[in-house]
C-alpha cells in the first residue's frame, strides 16, 4: 500500500472540490489507491490510531486548502486547526512527522498559509510547494496535479499504475470517449457498474457517443440518482448533447432529491441564469 494517496480536507471549507479531486484521481490511479474520508473508519476503532495507520501506508499526502481552512471554528469558538484532536490536525502532523511527501492543494483562490498562522506541529507545511486548482480551470489544473502525483509516486515500492498491461473493455472505452478529458472530473460512473481497469487520462478530448446518454436515461427512468446526476453533467457541459443549463439543473435537482450529495454541490455552484 506504499502507493496510497491520502486526501486531507476540511468539510466546512472544501468538500465539493475535494470530491471532484477524489473522482479525478480515482479515474487515474484507482479507488483502492485512495483514502479520503473519516467515514471509512470502522465502528469501534480508535480513530487516531486508524488515521495514523492509514497515513503510514500512504505514499503521498494531499492537503486540500480552501479560503476558510485556517478560520473554521469548533463548538467552543476556538480554531479547529489548533485542536490536537482535530482530524485535519492529526492527519497532517502524522504525515509531516513520518516525512511523507506532502503536497498542499490550494483551491477556490486560497493562499498558502504562513508558518506563523499554523500550530507548531504543522509549521513545516508552510515550506511545502503547493499546486493550485481553480474551479474555472479545473480540467487543466487537475491535469497538472495528476502530473505532480505521478512524479511523486513513480519509483515507490509496490506502486504500479492500475492501467498498465490491461485491456480496456468496449463499454468502459465508450463511456470515456464520451466524457473526454474534462468530463472525467464530474461524471459519476457508479451507474455503469463497471468492473474494468482504469484508463490513463488523456488531454485530448474524444468524440461524443450518444449511446451513453441513452443508457443514463434508461437508468434514470428507473430512479437511479447517479444516472440523473450524470445526465445533469452531460447537459451542463455539452457532452454528446447541446448545452442546456435548464435541463442540467432539472436533472441535478432530481438527483439531489434522491440524496445525491454531488448533485446538491453542483446545484449550489451553478450560476443564476
Image (tube, grey):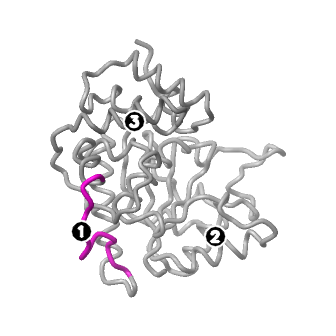
* Count of numbered labels shown in the rendering: 3
The residue that disc 3 covers is 216
Residue 124 highlighted magenta (yes or no): no
Q: Which residues are magenta?
A: 159-171
Residue 261 relative to residue 197: left or right: right
Give how far apart the Cα atoms at labels 3 and 1 are: 24 Å
**First reached walking from the N terminus: tag 1 or tag 2:** 2
Quarter holding the C terminus?
top left
Residue 213 relative to residue 232: left or right: left
Give how far apart the Cα atoms at labels 1 and 2 are: 45 Å
At numbered mark 3, what does the secondary structure look like: helix, strand or loop?
A: helix
How far across and how far down the image is residue 31, in percent?
46, 63
The residue that disc 1 covers is 167
Instruction: Locate residue 209: give its quadrant.
Output: top left
**First reached walking from the N terminus: tag 2 or tag 3:** 2
How far across and how far down the image is residue 17, in percent?
47, 44
Residue with the most extreme right position: 76
Q: Which of the two residues, 164 or 204, is positioned nearer the viewer here?
A: 164
Q: Residue 28: which numbered mark, if any?
A: none
Residue with the most extreme bottom position: 157
Q: Which of the two residues, 176 or 221, is positioned nearer the viewer here?
A: 221
The residue that disc 2 covers is 121
How far across and how far down the image is residue 134, in percent?
37, 41
Q: Main secondary structure of the magenta part?
A: loop
User: Do the numbered discs 3 and 1 sit on residues whose CB atoms are within 8 Å?
Assistant: no
> What residue do we see at 56% from left, 44% from top?
15
At numbered mark 2, what does the secondary structure look like: helix, strand or loop?
A: helix
Q: Which of the two residues, 126 or 199, is positioned nearer the viewer here?
A: 199
Instruction: Locate residue 150: give its quadrant.
Output: bottom left
- Is residue 100 depicted above or below 195 in this figure? below
Amino acid at each position: 500500500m506504499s502507493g496510497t494517496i491520502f486526501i486531507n480536507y476540511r468539510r466546512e471549507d472544501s468538500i465539493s472540490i475535494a470530491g471532484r479531486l477524489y473522482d479525478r484521481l480515482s479515474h487515474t490511479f484507482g479507488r483502492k489507491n485512495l483514502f479520503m474520508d473519516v467515514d471509512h473508519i470502522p465502528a469501534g476503532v480508535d480513530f487516531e490510531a486508524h488515521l495514523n495507520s492509514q497515513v503510514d501506508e500512504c505514499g503521498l499526502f494531499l492537503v486540500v486548502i480552501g479560503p476558510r481552512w485556517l478560520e473554521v471554528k469548533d463548538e467552543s469558538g476556538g480554531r479547529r486547526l489548533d485542536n490536537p484532536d482535530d482530524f485535519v490536525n492529526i492527519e497532517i502532523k502524522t504525515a509531516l512527522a513520518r516525512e511523507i511527501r506532502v503536497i498542499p492543494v490550494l483551491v477556490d483562490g486560497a493562499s498558502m498559509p504562513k508558518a506563523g498562522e499554523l500550530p507548531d506541529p504543522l509549521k513545516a507545511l508552510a515550506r511545502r510547494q503547493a499546486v493550485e486548482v481553480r474551479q474555472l480551470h479545473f480540467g487543466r489544473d487537475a491535469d497538472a496535479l495528476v502530473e505532480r502525483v505521478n512524479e511523486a509516486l513513480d519509483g515507490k515500492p509496490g506502486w504500479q499504475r492500475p492501467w498498465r498491461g490491461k485491456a480496456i473493455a468496449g463499454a468502459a472505452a465508450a463511456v470515456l470517449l464520451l466524457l473526454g478529458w474534462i468530463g472525467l472530473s464530474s461524471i459519476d460512473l457508479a451507474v455503469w457498474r463497471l468492473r474494468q481497469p482504469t484508463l490513463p487520462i488523456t488531454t485530448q478530448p474524444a468524440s461524443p457517443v450518444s449511446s451513453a446518454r441513452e443508457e443514463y436515461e434508461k437508468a434514470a427512468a428507473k430512479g437511479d440518482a447517479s444516472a440523473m446526476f450524470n445526465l445533469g453533467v452531460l447537459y451542463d457541459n455539452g457532452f454528446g448533447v447541446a448545452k442546456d443549463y435548464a435541463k442540467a439543473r432539472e436533472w441535478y435537482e432530481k438527483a439531489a432529491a434522491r440524496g445525491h450529495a454531488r448533485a446538491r454541490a453542483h446545484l449550489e455552484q451553478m450560476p443564476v441564469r
